[in-house]
Image: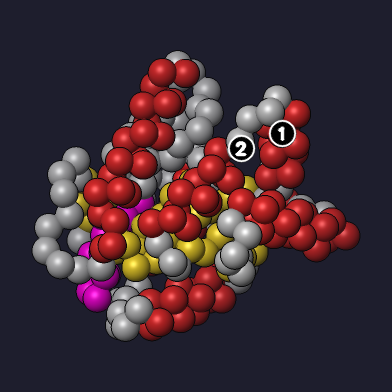
Amino acid sequence: MQERSRSKVKGGKPLIVFAGRSNVGKSSTIRALTGRRVRVGKRPGSTRWEFLIDLGSIILADMAGFGHMAGQSKATIEETKITVIHRLEEWGKKIAVAILIVDVSLFRVLVERWDKRGEIPVDIEFYGFLSEISSGVIVAANKIDKVKKSKISYELDYLEMKLREAVPDTEPQIVPISASKRVNISHLKETIEANLDRRGVEKPEW
Ligand code: GDP
């Protein structure tokens, strides 16, 4: 059951949240995991509110994509990010697992660009934030198919280094995937289930 929501999550079911900048492949990943179509290929900026999918033991929440979007003002981009942050804070302890999707084919270039400007890259800012509100944060390093084979371990090491810098006392959980090519999706599923199991939550009905 898919539900567009601007209101609080009803009932007591725990949540699994999917967050990420727009265009990282969040909808494609959810589709690869659940077989459900959630806004793939939509116009940028048209997805300001979260979608909820009931997976039996848990509710999956697809958060609005944040960060730069073509054709959107800085104020709108900031507002979307703040809306996502507020919603996640509101849910708080209900969040059993948080999945941060990053585009690993762009991650290093974007982080280096932000670092040069002395700003905190939004992916890293969100990783820090999610780690504060949930002890089960998984980073899905998407679009691995776009990275040259010879560069894959370099890019993944860079991602790991940046996550460790952001949250030093936590072992990052990184799962490289390609949502569109369906690479490693079963590993992502198993990692999610292992995190849910640690919190005593039953396997979802994917
Ligand atoms: P969202 O905005 O994060 O929900 O991103 P979408 O799922 O709508 O995907 C954005 C674009 O990236 C679409 O054109 C997808 O086909 C493409 N995409 C998503 N996942 C992958 C991937 O693993 N590899 C490649 N090459 N493209 C992808």
Pick the quarter of the image with the N terminus.
Answer: bottom left
Between disc 1 and disc 2, whose residue precedes?
Answer: 1
Helix, strand or loop for disc 1: helix
Quick check: can you spot residue 145? no
Question: In the visual, does 50 lie left or right of 174?
Answer: left
Question: Is the residue under label 2 in contact with that under label 1 (CB below 8 Å)?
Answer: yes
Task: Confirm if mark 2 falls within 8 A of ligand 1.
Answer: no
Question: In the visual, does 48 lie left or right of 19?
Answer: left
Quick check: can you spot residue 83? yes
Q: How did the renderer colour the structure?
A: secondary structure
The quarter of the displayed image where residue 81 is located: top left
Q: Residue at x 40, y 82 (%)?
A: 198
Q: Which residue is mark 1?
A: 115
**Label 1 sits on what residue type?**
Asp
Q: Magenta part of the protein: which range?
A: 52-62
Where residue 125 sits in the image (x, y, percent)?
54, 43
Query: Is 194 located above or below residue 154 in the figure?
Result: below
Q: Which residue is mark 2?
A: 121
Where residue 44 sits in the image (x, y, percent)?
45, 31
Where residue 68 sits in the image (x, y, percent)?
53, 28
Based on the picture, tell me whether residue 58 belongs to the magenta stretch.
yes
Question: In the visual, does 136 lie left or right of 159?
Answer: left
Query: Is 109 located above or below residue 188 in the figure?
Result: above
Q: Residue 109 or 32: which is nearer the viewer?
A: 109
Q: Label 2 neighbourhood size at 10 Å, few (<14), some (14-19), many (20+)?
A: some
